[in-house]
Image (spheres, rainbow, N blue to C red):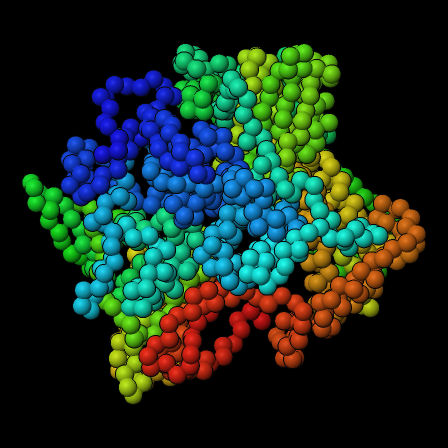
Amino acid sequence: MSDTLLDGGTLAEGCHPTTEINATVNGRKVQRRVPNHYRVIDFVREELKLTGNKEGCGAGECGTCSMFVDGKLIKSCLAPVQKINGCSVETIDDLDRDAGMSLLQQAFHKCGASQCGYCIPGMVMAATSTLRRNPGASRDEIKEGLGGNICRCTGYQKILDAVELARDIQSGAVPASALEEDAEAHSFIGQRTRRLDAPAKVTGAIKYAADMFMPNMLHMQVVRSPHPHARIVRIDAETARAIPGVECILTCDDVPGVDNFGVFIEDQPTLARGVVRYVGEAVVAVAAETLDIARAAVAAIHVEYEKLPSLFDPHTAMHDGAVQLHGFAQNNICKHTRIRKGDVDAALASADVIVEQTYDTQSVEHAYLEPEAGLAYVEADGCVTVQSPSQNITHHRHMLARILGRPINKVRMIMSTVGGGFGGKEDMIYQGMLALAAIKTRRPVRYVFTREESIKVSAKRHPFNIRYTMGLKRDGRIVATKMVMVADGGAYALSTPGVMNKSAILGPGPYDIANVWVDSIGVYTNNTPSGAFRAFGAFQSEFATECHLDLCAQRLGMDPVALRRINLMRDGATTHTRQQLDRVLAVECLEAAIKAAGWDAGVPYRQGQGKPQRNDFNYEGSRQSYLIGGQTQPLVPRASSKSDVHPVKISIN
Amino acid sequence: MLTFDHYLTPKSLDEAFDVLQRMPAARLLAGATDLLPWAREGRAGDVHLPAVVDLSRIAALGGISQEGARIRIGATTPISALQRHPLLMQQAPVLGACALWFADDQIREQATVGGNLVNASPAGDTQPALLALNTHVTLVRREGDRLIERSVPLSEFILGPSRTMLQPGEILLRLEFDALPNHGVAFEKVGHRRSLAISTVCLATLVHLDASKRIDDLRIAIGAVGPVPERLTDIEDLLTGVTPTSAALREASVRVADRVRSRSRQSYRREVLSNFVERSLAAAIAHAGLDLPRIPKESQNV
C-alpha cells in the first residue's frame, strides 16, 4: 500500500495529511511531500513552481493544464497527485529539452498563433501529442487532437496552420527555412509581423499573475455573500483569527481611505459596507500562510445577515416605491442617456410602414481563460505594489490611492500579462483587498480566483431590453427611428454609464436617419454587476437594429442588403448626435462584404414563399462545415460491404 | 475541493477489499475525471471523504481478451483503448465510434469504461453502445477469504441517475459483450460542444444483413433521453427479418419520439432522436453493405 494509515489524530484546521510523491518531471527526479489532496497541476505549479502549464477552469474543460504522464497526454486538473507516483511527467516548461523552442513552438511563433497566450501551452501540448502519435496527421485529425482545448480569443485558424507547418517541416515536405522571419516589407499593413511576446507565450515562460511567487508569500481567500440583498448584522471572525497561519482578516472597517470607487460613479466599497447587494459580493478577506489555511478560515467566519427585498428586473426596479439600492440613484436609475434629433412623432405619422418589435439580449460571461488573480507587496521604500491583469491600470492606481489614503507616488500598479480580458478586467474588484492585506501584513499576498468565483463575481455583458419603432417609406427610406433601451446594470455601476452612452450613440447604426429618438437607461438591480464587454454596449443595440432592418425588409418585400444600401450614411452625412461627417465608406464596405459572401439578392424566406432556394450557401471559397468522426477513424469495412470505406460522418444538427 | 484523510492505491483485489473492510465509507475511484469536477463549487462543493481507493493499479481490473464469441475488458480499461485496441477495433467497432465522441483525447486517456457505467450518468456515452452489444457486467465481492463474482446484464445494472446494482463492498470487475465483427455500426451524438459535450441525445445502432440483404440482427440503444439508457426493442422487432427500404427506416424513425423521457428540451430531443434513428439505421446498413437513398425531409423551419 502506497500510503500508510495515519493514527487517527485530528489535524489542525487547514492542515491536511501529506503524501510523498516520487516522480520524474521533465527528466529530473523529484521527491516531495505535499498535501494528499493535491492534484497533478497543484504539484507541478505550486510545489515545483513549473508554471508553464496553466489552470484555466480546474474542471477538465479548457485544456490549459494538459501534460504528459508516462507519454499519455492528460488533463492534470483531473488527476490526483498520487497518479504520478513512479511515473514520468512532461510539462511545457521543458518540452524543448532546454534547446530554446521545439519545432512546434517555433511554428506557433512563425504563424502568429498566440494572442493572450493563456491557452497556448495547452494547445502546444495537445498538438505535440497529436504529432507524436500520428506524424502525418491531416488538418481534421489535428482539429480532433485539439478538441479538448479551448481558446477564447478565437485564434484556432493560426494554431491549425502552425501545427500543419510543424508537421510538414518534420516530414521534410517543407524546408526548415520556412520558420525564418519574413523579409521586412515596406508597409506593415497586410504583412505578417512577429509578435515580441510570442516566444515567451509559446514556451509557457511568460508569467501571468497566478504564476508569480514571492518568498514569504501569503494566500488570500474571500467570504462572499450568499444573498442578493441583505444587511450585515454581525461578522464573527474570532474562530478564524485563532487558526494558526491566519495572518490577517479584513473587513470594510480596515479601509483607511475613501472607500467608494468606480469607473464613472463611485458607488462600490472594497468590502461590503453594512449591506450586500448581490450574490458573491466580497464581505471579509483573509490572508494566510497557505491556501488551505485561508480556505479553512473562510469556512470558520460566520456572517449574520438580515435579508432585504431584492430587485432582479430592471423594469420593476424603476417603479416608484421600489427598494432603493443606492441612496443617490432616484428610481434606481444609474444612467439615462437621451438622443433627440428631428421630430420623431411627426415623421412616424408620415411613414408608409411602421415596424415595431422588442428585442432582448442576455447577460454574457467573458469566460477569459485566465481567471482573475493578483499579487500585492510593499516595497522597501513603502510603496505598495499590485500586479494584476488590469485593463485600466492608471485609473486603478488612482482609485487605489484613494482607498488606501496614500499619495499616488506610494501606490504602484503593474499590469501583468492579461490572459484574456474582453473588457471584463477593466473593473477593479479585488486589487484593493490585496493592497490592504499587503500593507497590514508587510508580506506579499496573492489571490487567485477559481473559475466558479470568476463567473460569480466579475462583471457580465449588460442584458438589454430594446423596444424598437421604425417608420419607413415604401421605397425603403427610413424616416424615423425610436429606441427605448433598458439595461440591467446590476448591483454596482462599474462601466454602466459609458455602456449606456455608447449603446445610445451607435445604436441606430450607420444609417442616415433624419429623426432619431433614443433612450438608453441603465438600472441598478441585485444581479451580478454588468460591465464592459467587447463593443461596450454597441453590440446589444446594433444587434437590435440589424435584426430590425431584416424584419423591415421582410415587411417591405425587399432584399435586406438593398434596404441597407438605401439608408447607409454617405459623404456629408449627419450622425445621430449631429456630427457632420465628410467622408464615409459604409457603402463601399457593404459592397465588398456582399461580394465576398456571394450574396444572392432577394427577399429572405424565399422557400417559404414558394420561390427557388437561395444559392449563396456553400459559396466557393467559403469554409465548408466540419464533419467529424469518420475522417479520423474510418471504420473497418464489413466483409459484405460493396464500397471501400463507409466513414460514420456525423455533423451536429 | 476534494479532500480526504487517506488515498490508497491497492495493487490487488485482496488489498482493495482489506481497505473496504476497514473503511466501508471509502470511495472508489479509477480515472477520477468525474469525481474531481464533482467536488467543486456549484456541484457537490467541498467534499471530505475518509478515504479514496484508487483502483487503477490493480492488474485484475485491466486486460482485454476474447473468449469465444464474447469480448472481456477490465473495468479500468481507459476509453482511449476503445479507439486503439486492435481487438476492439475489429470485433466491436461501435465502441470506437462512440469513444470518438467521448470527451476529448486527454480525458479518454484517463476516464475508464467501468467508471462510465458505475457513475450511471444518464448521459454516459458508452452506455448505449455497450447496451447494444448485450454487455454483462461482472461484480466481485469478498466473503471470508473467497472472492465471489456475479454477472448482471447491463440493462439491469443501471437503475437510475447515479444508481446501480453495485452493493457496498462490491467492485465492478469487468465487462463482457458480443464480438460482432460483421455487423454494420453507427453512433450518433448531439451536445452543446464537439469535445466534452454532455450528450443531449446519443444512440448506437448495430445491424447484420444475411446473404439476401435481409436484416437478421438489429440492435438500437438510446441514451441521454431518459434516466437510463434503453434498447428500442419495438424498432428492432419491426425491422428484423425485413429487407430494409428507405420507407421502412422513415417509418421506424417516426415511432420513437415518445421514448424521450427527459425533463428538459423535450421537443428538441424528440426531433433529434427521430432523425438519429433514421440516419443511424441508414449508416449502419450502408456499413453492412447496402446503400439506401434517404427520403428527403421537408424543412420545418420555413
Looking at the image, residue A344 sits to the left or right of residue B194; the answer is: right
Residue at the extreme bottom of the image, as rendered: B212
Q: Residue at x 38, y 51 (%)?
A: B109
A160 in relation to A368, above or below:
below
A214 in relation to B211, above or below:
above
Q: Residue at x 16, y 36 (%)?
A: B18
Q: Residue at x 56, y 39 (%)?
A: A204
Q: Residue at x 42, y 59 (%)?
A: B101
Count the marks: 0
Instruction: Give percent across and percent down for residue A607.
Output: 62, 76
Residue in front for this viewpoint, A450 or A211: A211
Q: Write down the quadrant of residue A433 in the picture.
A: top right
Residue A59 makes an appearance in the image: no
A570 in relation to B296, above or below:
above
Residue A186 makes an appearance in the image: yes
Looking at the image, residue A586 sits to the left or right of residue B180; the answer is: right
Residue in front for this viewpoint, A475 or A367: A367
Looking at the image, residue A298 sits to the left or right of residue A606; the answer is: left
Instruction: Give percent across and percent down for residue A53.
Output: 51, 39
| Screen quadrant of the N terminus of chain A | top left
Q: Write down the quadrant of residue A611 in the picture.
A: bottom right
Instruction: Give percent across and percent down for residue A329.
Output: 68, 28
Looking at the image, residue A34 sits to the left or right of residue A119; the answer is: left
Instruction: Give percent across and percent down for residue B77.
Output: 29, 53
Residue in front for this viewpoint, A290 or B192: A290
